[in-house]
Image (tube, rainbow, N blue to C red):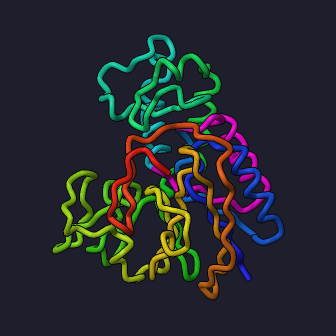
Amino acid sequence: MPRVLAIGDVHGCLDELQELLHQAEGQFDAIVFVGDLIDRGPKIIETVDFVYELSGRMDVTVIRGNHDDKFCRWAKQSIVHALENGKVPGIKAKNMPDWQVGSVQGRDEHSSSAPLLCSVLDDHNVRRAYEHIEEMTAETYYLKWGEFIFVHGGIPADWYDFPTSRGGMRQLMYTRHVNATTGRALSLGKQTDEDPYWASVYDGKFGHAIFGHQIHDLGDEDLMYEHATCLDTGCAFGVALTGIVVDTDTGERLNRVTVLATEEYARPRNWYSAKSGIQKAGDK
């Protein structure tokens, strides 16, 4: 029985990750991280190192998340210049990594913090993190395993097969809402009240989807859709890190494991409760 432990958005919360693995010990044969190992939390580099080392001694898959992708694109172009100058000419601020290190410090989820990055990381650490993330996540935008499909963000409702282009596959990292008429993925902020959250209309055509990316409340009724299960429960924002053990042959969801966050490491401006349609301003 292939038992897989899927883990939600870690975002540098290494202590909570290690506790989750401890609580789930003996229940799984393989691990799938649904993306966003980095940003926001207190132990970003340590988290990357830990997962990389873990992948060398057991079956570990890391789906590429949008934060992982953003860091790798930034690092590939700008490591040396960023470390020397604290800024990256020619790259839009929205493409800067959101490194939230140590404590909340009045920052929010949209902060651009290359100067802070430079103060806590040296060239060797950044290069190592970049190389490890690239090696673990390169071209891994989804994983189909038995009755399940693991993605970071979501699956557009108008897909009847997976695209072969990298541009098309990248939608798996970002999809939240889909057009109510066409089913096409919408950019964040472009949705209307009529446009549904993707998981609420996903019909399971590719398997039961396990995903992260969008913070959900902790209750089973909030996390579980008919054909999808969300694992992002806002650990870096002081809520919890969530994983689930599944049987890939039978499609059973065997056990959910939740570890409460030790503290609030970053502060969101707001988040959208996907099931209720309520936008929440900085609360948990």
Please give the name of the residue rendered at 58% of the width and 81% of the height, measured from the top-left corner: 146
Q: Where is residue 171 in the image (x, y as percent from the top left)?
A: 34, 58
Please give the name of the residue rendered at 73% of the width and 57% of the height, measured from the top-left corner: 20
Membership of 45 in magenta stretch: yes
In which quadrant of the rendered image does the N terminus lie? bottom right
Please give the name of the residue rendered at 65% of the width and 48% of the height, measured from the top-left corner: 261
Membership of 158 in magenta stretch: no
Q: Where is residue 133 in the image (x, y as percent from the top left)?
A: 58, 43
Residue at the extreme left: 181
Residue 18 located left or right of residue 124: right
55 lies above or below 108: below
Start and end of the magenta stretch?
A: 40-65
Which image quadrant is residue 112 in? top left
Please give the name of the residue rendered at 50% of the width and 62% of the height, measured from the top-left corner: 217
Quick one: 19 or 119, which is closer to the camera?
A: 19
200 lies above or below 105: below
